[in-house]
Amino acid sequence: MRKQSGVSMILIVLLAFTLLAAACGEDTSETTAAPATTTTASSAEPLKFGMILVGPQNDRGWSQAHFEAGQYLEEQLGAEMIVLDKVNSADLPDKTVDQVAQDMINRGAQLVFLTSDDMRDGALLAAELNPTVPMIWSSGDSAWAEGEAPAPFDNLGNIMGRMEFGKMIAGCAAGLTTQTGSIAYLGPLINDETRRLVNSAFLGASYCWENYRGETTPLEFTVNWIGFWFNIPGFTLDPTQVANGFLDAGADVIISGIDTTEALDVAGQAADAGESVWALPYDFDGACELKPEICLGVPYFNWGPAYLEVAQSVIDGTFTATWQWNGPDWTDLNNKETTAIGFVKGDGLSADNASTLDQFIAGLADGSINPLVGPLNYQDGSTYLADGETATDQQIWYTKQLLEGVTGPSE
């Protein structure tokens, strides 16, 4: 009995020592793995994150693409999303972005996505007031050390896709298809981002018009701005009226730069009336489904892979605030697990033009085609890129004017 009792005592001592060591090891791991400035998700509970959308979560555009990325995180991680849409001064005048972020944090959000260029002030304030909560301001540049206005909060990172490529592809599809030589661009508000995307579409259209079709007469390329990312009656121009104005003026292809589907809607109505017109919506991979027969394709953002990486870093305690400008996966443009920018061809694109578009995409992929090489001038005649000069990230991101050859205001 004494021998049996001695063994029991040894086992008890060993068990106590093991439990103590495990407890100490767990505390040490949390202390060394987690950055001092940010919170981490407990392994015992699913990650809870906030998603602040500027427009409706079902807009078939920008906001829906972010919302579906949030759903992707829920599927991949078993995470829980807190979402609020239409967070803008017209739809929700009594709510500010920082207030919405704070409410989500108070409800347990351990990570917050702020998903509009418009949200800069609110994102910076929210990050300052909640320095231990990781945040991503999508399309922003606050974490870019080489940017024009860095605001290096340790808890605020930025993610954006290189949509310039998507817009060049959209522009090429328009340039290959137009029968009138007149292309219109339905623009949102005017800033560096929207100017660079208009310029990219123009350069893609001009390249394919000249190099694949052999046209020597310059394209007509016109942009009109509605004043915001989507229609807000009494605040913006009506995008339906603007799109109809494009067709009345002779354009037969409308490229959308707004978050919603009016360009495709209007072109579809005109096509139903017997007109030969086409459109390219924006942002959301399923946008062509509304009127596939006259849709030439849609360039879209795929936020899922980058958002998943960030969410996993919060769970792991390794989050760092970085600036990401992510490009397409050229090996598989529409691989939802890897690409940041995709392009879905529409049924309105002829088989021959689809094949030619593939050549253009291949040239962008291997670098043999780069429309952002000079000489290129701004609208006022000043030099944007000198002869042979390749645009830097700073020159592309901070685009101060539309290019020579584009009709429409730069400011």
Image (cartoon, grey):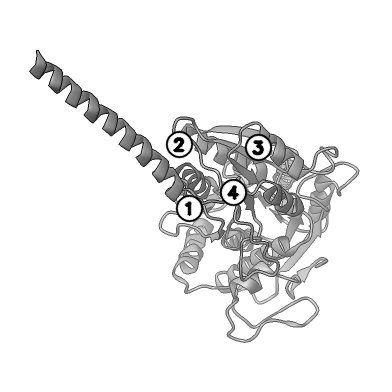
Q: Nearer the viewer, mark 3 or mark 1?
A: 3
Kind of residue at badge 1 = Thr
Amino acid type, label 3:
Ile
Q: Nearer the viewer, mark 3 or mark 4?
A: 3
Give the label, 2 or 3, closer to the camera.
3
User: Residue 262's spot in the image, x, y percent?
Assistant: 74, 44
Residue farthest to the front? 2
Q: In this view, which residue lies farthest toward the top?
A: 1
Mark earlier in primary sequence (3, 4)? 3
Disc 1 packing (10 Å; few <14; some 14–19; many ≥20): many
Mark 4 crowdedness (10 Å alpha carbons): few <14, some 14-19, many ≥20: many
The Cα–Cα distance between marks 2 and 4, rounded to whole angstroms, is 34 Å
Question: Mark 2 sits on what residue?
Answer: 76
Q: Residues within 10 Å of mark 2 (few under 14, many from 20)?
A: few
Residue 232, compared with residue 250, is above or below; it is above
Q: Earlier in the sequence, mark 4 or mark 1?
A: 1
Which of the two labelled residues, at mark 2 and mark 4, occupies the earlier sequence position? Answer: 2
Question: CB under 8 Å between callouts 3 and 1?
Answer: no
Residue 348 - label = 4
Based on the displayed image, in which of its 4 quarters is residue 86 positioned? top right
